Amino acid sequence: MHFDPRRDNVWEALEAGLRLSQEGMKVWLDGENRVDLPPGSLLREAERRAAGLAGMGVRAGDRVAVLAQTTPEVMLAFLACWRAGGVAVPLPLPMRAVDPAAFIEQTAAKLRACEARLAVIPSGIMGFVEDLDADCPLVPAEGLARDGACPDASPDPDDVALIQFTSGSTSQPRGVTLTHRNLLSNAASIIGRIGVTPDDRVVSWLPLYHDMGLIGFFLTALVSGTSQTYLSPQLFVSRPELWLRALSESGGTITGGPNFSYALISRLIRSGAADGLDFSRLRLALNGAEPVDLQVMEGLVEAAAPLGMRPEVPYPVYGLAECTLAVTFPDPGKPFKVDWVSRYHLEKGEGALPVERGSAGARPLVCLGSPLSGLEVRIRGKEGGWLGDRELGEVCVRGDSVMRGYWEDPERTAEAFTDGWLRTGDLGYMHNGELYLAGRIKDMVVIGGRNIYPEDVEACCERVEGVRKGNAVAFAVTNRRGRERMVLVGETRLEPGAESRELARELACRVAEEIGAPLGEAVLVRAGSLPKTSSGKKQRFLTRQMYLSGELEVVARTGAVIEPVG
């Protein structure tokens, strides 16, 4: 590591990393066209755009919002913001099936909340946001550059560098306030754990408005001096095989994505879409941002082995925006580990009792590794005390990467901490110093005294042919008798008719058999119609609201319609 989080700021670390880099950055615009950004060009153009920001009135500490499209101009806008001493505020692009009015309203609310000095907008989206009432100028990303000197800006390590709005998968988005020390400490911990060097070649399609894409890949790759290849998430969604091509053509050594993306590329590989590609140089494929599924991990190992991928490449990790990004990583260079535990004992809150693989009621949990340097992880019980090995409770984190708080929200900040420890809301346990996650506290469904984890129900249903992988959502509703019932909503490409009705019935039967709990109702909806966050996570709360209000695009249902009271 060539920077010191105790004394450096983000721009100083970025500048040092770019001076180490041999190739800089390549951005894939589509399957044929690329843009090369050598290290020297990145430095020069960042300076020119920082001069432009300064000329528009941006001073040290000012918030600069960026609608974070994966384009060279937007990437340079981030660099320019830190060079000018500004606070970067990445904002998402409009997603699939988005209501334009809702997107405009949410974007304007974030701009007002962070009191942005200006908002950098990709020119292709300018028409979409022309009605944005932002209380700040909207500046095209392509128009930032100016000749002239950039004023010196040397923020202190404890000055704010980034406001990362959470994705809203469990609540309303809130602005996570991160300092230069937070960002560089987390980057240093990642680099140290997985041994990133300038010889590595990073490949990412992850969105720059998500912490895994912006911090885990863009920022960390730049400060470590690696060569980088980027695809936009929109390009990945439309042509996912390009991720595989980019890995092979660049000799990629490190990549990453959420669980669903590995399920997708495993199917592509089996279909022959990756024939002739070479993954022999790949050493780490980080799997994070959503629950890690054992079947997906094993499927990737099996599918990609003929293309040279080694079994130690799939790399499950854990983190959250409130801790900058990364919290626990396994030791690299070893196959991932799995803990088979009793589902019954987990549901009763009695801890993680080990059982034999494949035995009745066994639940596999993938090991997420040990805390990174500068971080501590402990498990807190319901009564507030710390728990021991294999005892189930709330995951709590303390250390250099933990956020200062939520932007201008002392009440929510106070709720997030207890005695200096960040309360993550995740349920898990430690075993031999390593973390295993069981689910989220707010998402649990209580049926007959058992704590049913939606992740278990969703994984069970997504294994049924006809349900889209990564697109099943389970949640609870309370019926008129005051009893909690579980509902499963899953996407399908089937049309209304006998086949889809049979699939809905099969889902209800499968959950009863595997989970041992009844489904109040199984609902199949059209592919692409379930709401997701800007980072692609499931939105259980919003899906539940759509179910209650009758807004779902229903293809079939089991017929046992619940009459909810809330």
Image: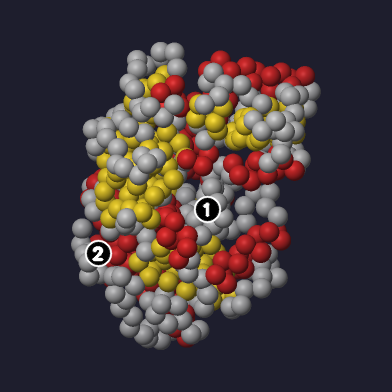
Question: Which residue is under mark 1?
Answer: 167
In the orientation shown, which residue stands out farthest toward the top? 359
Residue 520, image x, y percentages: 66, 26
The answer to whether one can see residue 177 in this image is yes
Q: Residues within 10 Å of mark 2 (few under 14, many from 20)?
A: many
> Marks 1 and 2: CB-CB under 8 Å?
no
Amino acid identity at mark 1 = Ser
Helix, strand or loop for disc 2 = loop
Where's residue 370, x and y in %? 27, 41
- Residue 209: x and y, percent? 49, 58
Q: Which disc number belongs to residue 37?
A: none
497 vs 188: above or below? above
Image check: 546 left or right of 468? right
| Residue toward you, 55 or 409 | 409
Check disc 2 and give the amino acid type. Answer: Pro
Location of the C terminus by quadrant is: top right
- How many other residues sit within 10 Å of disc 1, few (<14), some (14-19) or many (≥20)? many
**What residue is drawn where x is 52% and y is 26%?**
449
- The image quadrant that residue 356 belongs to is top left
Instruction: Pick the residue in front: 340 or 57.
Output: 340
Residue depicted at x 28% and y 58%: 400
Horizontally, residue 263 falls left or right of residue 317, namely right
List the residue tagged with mark 2.
5
Instruction: Tell me the distance, in whole angstroms, between the alpha carbons under discs 1 and 2.
Output: 27 Å
Hey, which quadrant is residue 305 in on the image? top left
Q: Is residue 321 left or right of residue 220?
A: right
Report the residue at 27% width, 35% height from top.
388
* Earlier sequence position, callout 1 versus callout 2: 2
